[in-house]
Amino acid sequence: KAGVTQTPRYLIKTRGQQVTLSCSPISGHRSVSWYQQTPGQGLQFLFEYFSETQRNKGNFPGRFSGRQFSNSRSEMNVSTLELGDSALYLCASSLALLTGPGSEYGYTFGSGTRLTVV
Amino acid sequence: KQEVTQIPAALSVPEGENLVLNCSFTDSAIYNLQWFRQDPGKGLTSLLLIQSSQREQTSGRLNASLDKSSGRSTLYIAASQPGDSATYLCAGRYSGGGADGLTFGKGTHLIIQP
């Protein structure tokens, strides 16, 4: 079956611009989470969407936002880009909500979008 | 706030050796623990998932264990191969982890020398 698909794979943006990243989860998965990965901070949780609603949110500024559509596809938007936003952005899907039951369910990650802000 | 620590941060061993990667976590209220590998510049590939009610899981040459009482998990790799070279990450999922998501360790960078 198809895995988690993230587009685009690479992006170069200028400081101050905004960017939208896309994630298509595994068919049937209703939870989509986003993570930022940098060499210094490692993997940090941005937010999780489940059934089109943001259910959990990490400690990132409001410039980072997202949404989920009825087919579970999700987009993440970053406005007013800063140099420090350069990172690998990873999307993960799961059958279970992060803070809900279902210990047998893990997460499947996409290949990521490499964002470079210049 | 949950914390996950991985030791060692880096490891280099000759091909064919058996090796153990360690992961420790601070909160025993863990739903499950998942091991991933990440190749340079790529996404995460899931290796094994251990539920809180389980003690270990096996897949091929990989075996992962979970000891909630001591807050530790280990990933055992048998008969290592150069293709096993990657960064290995463990991640805990918690019932109260809404603000943290999956809690990841910093990873162990593994190099298998041919």
Image (cartoon, coloured by chain):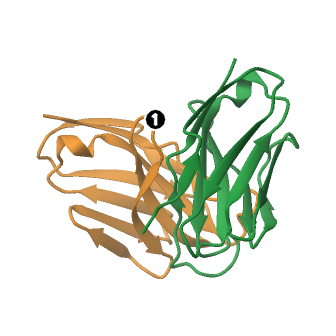
Chain colours: A green, B orange
Q: Residue at x 78, y 25 (%)?
A: A82
Task: Say what secondary structure mark 1 lies in.
Answer: loop
Q: Is residue A27 above or below residue B88?
A: below
Residue B77 position, x and y percent, is 24, 55
Residue nearer the viewer, A8 or A111: A8
Q: Which residue is drawn at 50% across and 79% down?
A: A104
Residue nearer the viewer, A36 or A75: A75
Identify the residue position indicated by label 1 in the image. Answer: B41
- The answer to which quarter of the image holds residue A9 is top right
Residue B87 position, x and y percent, is 39, 42
Q: Residue at x 75, y 73 (%)?
A: A51
Direction from residue A10 to residue B80 in the image, left or right: left
- The answer to which quarter of the image holds residue A102 is bottom right
Q: Which amino acid does label 1 sit on?
A: Gly
Q: Is residue A7 above or below residue B70?
A: above
Q: Which chain carries label 1?
A: B
